[in-house]
Image (tube, grey):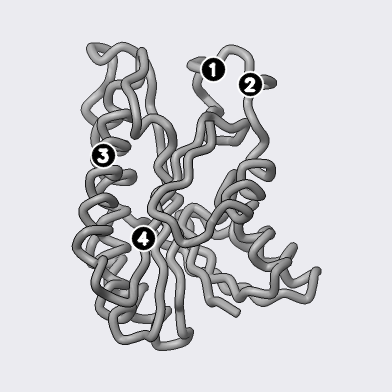
């Protein structure tokens, strides 16, 4: 069984992936900014006799990421990383604040890069390791009132495609996941999606990701 690290594991897709991987018998390492949601997921996993550990972390802080990952690796033999954490601010570009721009780029782009970089040296020592980056279809095409968010996802797409080439002769596989919108807490506080009922549930998307993951470079869920 794998030992899987999931960022943004307290809610939404990260939570559902953690629960489904736990059902399969994998050990979960749950990372997120807020401790309470992580505890909730951990409790659910333990209730099914699964194994889960929580590590609160703000992935936008390079030094904190490095230190926390070292702590995790001192305590667990991690074999898979799921970069799932992300934030979004939506609306016309001229209405975006500097803080909102920083939050999107720092979390979605820098955070993904920081966490991946921290695990990479360790992964290279293993017989086999896997990195999965959750990107969304915003990394495939432009969208109205999503310019900064889409820019961040295009960046993660480029980062992932480059990693695939960089690591193709190694023991590390890299997969990019592109999926459409989901009905998650991600949209709370935003009126960007007028009718959330038309969105897929995160559990449905999580099931599809796990079912379709066969080590390929891309998984696209429209």
How far apart marks 1 and 2 lie (CA) works out to 6 Å
Instruction: Classify 120 as above or below 95.
Output: below
CA separation, marks 1 and 4?
Answer: 31 Å
Q: Mark 2 packing: few (<14 Cα in 10 Å), some, or many (20+)?
A: some
Q: Which mark is residue 196?
A: 2
The image shows residue 215 at horizontal and vertical percentages of: 46, 61
Judging by the rendered image, the residue that carries numbered circle 1 is 193
Q: Earlier in the sequence, mark 2 or mark 3?
A: 3
Q: Quadrant of the N terminus?
A: bottom right
Q: Are marks 1 and 2 in contact (CB under 8 Å)?
A: yes
Residue named by callout 3: 105
Query: What is the secondary structure assignment of the residue under circle 4?
Result: strand
Task: Characterize the local packing of mark 3: few (<14), some (14-19) or many (20 or more) Cα atoms within 10 angstroms.
Answer: many
Q: CA distance from mark 2 to mark 3?
A: 25 Å
Q: Disc 1 or disc 4, which is closer to the eye?
A: 4
Q: Residue at x 62, y 48 (%)?
A: 206
Number of the front mark, 3 or 4: 4
Instruction: Please tell me the numbered disc located at residue 174.
Output: 4
Circles 2 and 4: CB atoms closer than 8 Å: no
Asked if 128 appears above or below 34 in the picture, the reply is below
Tell me the SS state at disc 2: helix
Q: Earlier in the sequence, mark 1 or mark 3?
A: 3
Q: Mark 2 against mark 4, which lies toward the viewer?
A: 4
Residue found at x 27% / y 70%: 118
Q: Residue at x 63, y 21 (%)?
A: 196
């Amino acid at each position: 069984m794998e030992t899987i690290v999931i960022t943004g594991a307290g809610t939404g897709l990260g939570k559902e992936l953690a629960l489904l991987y736990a059902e399969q018998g994998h050990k979960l390492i749950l990372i997120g900014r807020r401790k309470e949601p992580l505890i909730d997921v951990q409790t659910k996993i333990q209730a099914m006799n699964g194994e889960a550990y929580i590590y609160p972390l703000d992935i936008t802080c390079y030094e904190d990421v490095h230190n926390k990952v070292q702590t995790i690796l001192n305590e667990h033999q991690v074999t898979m990383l799921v970069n799932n954490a992300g934030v979004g601010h939506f609306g016309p570009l001229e209405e975006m604040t500097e803080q909102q721009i920083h939050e999107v780029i720092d979390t979605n782009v820098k955070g993904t890069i920081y966490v991946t970089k921290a695990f990479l040296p360790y992964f290279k020592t293993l017989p086999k390791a896997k990195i999965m980056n959750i990107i969304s279809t915003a990394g495939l095409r432009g969208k109205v009132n999503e310019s900064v968010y889409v820019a961040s996802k295009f960046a993660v797409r480029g980062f992932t495609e480059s990693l695939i080439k960089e690591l193709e002769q190694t023991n590390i596989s890299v997969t990019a996941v592109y999926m459409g919108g989901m009905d998650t807490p991600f949209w709370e506080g935003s009126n960007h999606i007028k009718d959330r009922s038309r969105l897929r549930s995160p559990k449905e998307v999580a099931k599809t990701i796990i079912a379709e993951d066969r080590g390929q470079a891309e998984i696209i869920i429209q």
